[in-house]
Amino acid sequence: MSEKVLSCPKDGNALSLVYESEKIGNVVKISIYYKCPTCGYRKDLEKLEVQRGEQLLAVKKFTRPPQ
Ligand SMILES: [Zn+2]
């Protein structure tokens, strides 16, 4: 089984997958993106917003198709 490795369009290095979460009030924003460790090139993959209420959990999902 081979995993597809994306390479940086600028310098050809392998991109690493990064998960990043940021909490603002009761909303947690999660970003999933590829990043080049060498030049810092970033390619957004998915963005999620999780909102915590009293009894509900709302999730907004933003998916961008590969460009
Ligand atoms: Zn790069």
Image (cartoon, helix red, strand yellow):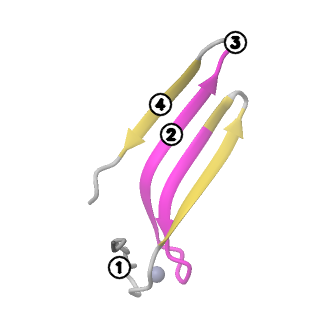
Q: Residues within 10 Å of mark 2 (few under 14, many from 20)?
A: some
Kind of residue at disc 1 = Pro
Judge from the rendering whether residue 20 lies leftward or rightward of residue 59; answer left or right: right
Q: Is mark 1 within 8 Å of ligand 1?
A: yes
Q: Earlier in the sequence, mark 1 or mark 3?
A: 1
Instruction: Kindly identify which numbered label has been placed on residue 9.
Output: 1
**In this figure, which residue is indicated by the disc labeled 3?**
54
Extreme residue in the top direction: 55
Front tag of 1 and 2? 2
Q: Is residue 28 above or below residue 8?
A: above
Q: Residues within 10 Å of mark 3 (few under 14, many from 20)?
A: few
Q: CA distance from mark 2 to mark 3?
A: 20 Å
Kind of residue at disc 3 = Glu
Kind of residue at disc 2 = Leu
Kind of residue at disc 4 = Lys
| 47 falls in the magenta region | yes
